[in-house]
Amino acid sequence: MNFFVNRTMGIGNSGVEHAEFYRAKLFDAKKIPYKYVFVEMTKNLHEAMDHWNIRPEQVINMWEYFVFGESYLDDGAPQIMKAKEEVILDSTNTQHRVDNVTSSGIRIERHMVKYPNDEPGKDNLLVSISRVQVFNAQTDEMKVEYEYTLDPRRGRILHNVHLYNFDESGDQLFFPNEVQLQRFFFQRLVAHFGTPANFMLDRGEESEAALLYHKPKGVHVMEVIHADHLSDRKIPTDPLWNNHYEYSLTHLDEIDRLVVATEMQRQDLLKDFPESDQKITAIPVGGVRNQDVTGGKEKKLEGAFKLVTVSRLADEKHIDIAIKAVAEAKKSIDVSLDIYGQGSQLGKLTQTIKDLDAEDYIHLMGHTNHPNEIYPQYDAFISASFSEGFGLTYIEALNADLPVITFDARFGALELIHEDENGVLVDFKRDDQDYDVAELAKGIIKAHDNYTELQKHTRQSTANYQDHVIADKWEALINGL
């Protein structure tokens, strides 16, 4: 069995989850068995699964397993009741307990605790989760109990986990921390499904530690890198790792395969791990349907140069720079921008558009699950991200015959976008937004002025990213373990 290991998923997801969805589609095509494995308690998991057309039997959530038992591993948990939430307040009108019932039939009681705010000059009380109890909502039997502690450096830490009346044995089990709990969980998966068992780690340092320490016989661990593995390489012999991948890169000898999305990133890793040529492999995390890539649709500009971006509205995506660049380019050409996505920066971006008096030509369009249906309405795709491990939206846009305007950032942009062929790459400086805005504005104008030549090559550049090509790579990787 192949397990895609992640913390959780939701209705709105990052590129990590979309990479898993795409991988699942390829495994289905090749008839390779797999399970999504989520290790975080998620109250709306099944609503998210419905949203993304994922069946109950395709998913294993660690906490649902502890509640529902062994048969859950094969059948999953169907939605059997209406999800609900109740907040219980204390005499000071502060949250004392938050109770959730999930649609799969789990009742979660979160007990809150008050503690002083230790920030200088602050004398208020803060509220956080102290203890969690998990019940089978149908039988009212408590199955799990655990605590949280706030660590000044590591944040909220889960510990002291009790499993009650576990399995047919009826044992009570105790785990002092999440790593040991996950190790037990993964061992149960291997015992149930047998070997070989291939764990593809998409997110979660606790999962890495749980699997790599005392790795069972017949288990293979593959780390999937979804972003730049470096924070910087200012000192060539002493690189600063991206902290999300530091654990895996400092335990590379225990990992069976390291999967990156581009050949460029693979070559960069080999600078630091030259002996790992056979261990590090490049497989794109997204692609396009099998088709005749020579049959792209040629477009001509009519009216405003219509730009689009599809992204989480997150700080690291630097959408504010794209907005300011479009406003700057507007001084020279007729241009518009539609932004699809949701996230924490919505208020800030709304204000930025207002401050620029750009509401007539820059619009926040909300979330979309079907970018392929909206791309044909536009002329080009724009991104202001400083780093993309692959850039799934780039390949989707190219397949829709849209040139891409973006920064020359590692790794997706540099591998997917070819200057003067299928898009425009511009320079950027991480600490100089004025420079970035000016460069991206120049890129917009250049793409506009050279549109016909750029647009005609877009779909052809996706030839190596067709589904059957990428599916063959995954099949070869699995068979070669």
Image: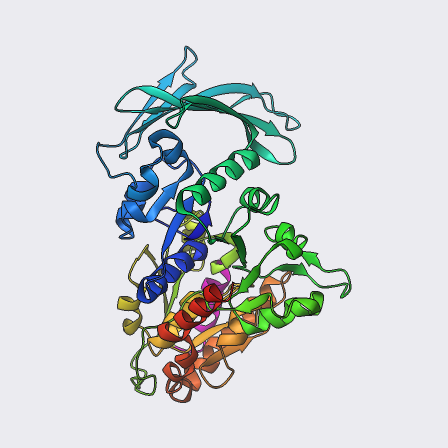
Residue 321 falls within the magenta-colored stretch: yes
- Residue 155 vs residue 42, the one in the foreground: 42
Residue 450 falls within the magenta-colored stretch: no
Magenta region, residue range: 320-333
| Residue 154 on image: x %, y % | 62, 36
Q: Which residue is drawn at 44% across and 42% down?
A: 191
Q: From the viewer's perspective, is residue 193 above or below residue 239?
A: above
| Residue 111 on image: x %, y % | 44, 20
- Residue 444 vs residue 275, the one in the foreground: 275
Q: Visible in this render: residue 382?
A: no
- Does residue 246 appear to the left or right of 305 in the view shown? right
| Residue 233 on image: x %, y % | 71, 63
Q: Visible in this render: residue 432?
A: yes
Outermost residue toward the top in this view = 91
Q: From the viewer's perspective, is residue 118 above or below residue 364?
A: above
Q: Of helix, strand and loop, which mostly describes the magenta segment? A: helix
- Does residue 361 appear to the left or right of 161 in the view shown? left
- Does residue 432 appear to the left or right of 301 in the view shown? right
Q: From the viewer's perspective, is residue 316 above or below residue 459?
A: above
- Residue 7 vs residue 122, the one in the foreground: 7
Counting every numbered tag in the picture gives 0
Q: Which residue is drawn at 45% across and 71% down?
A: 473
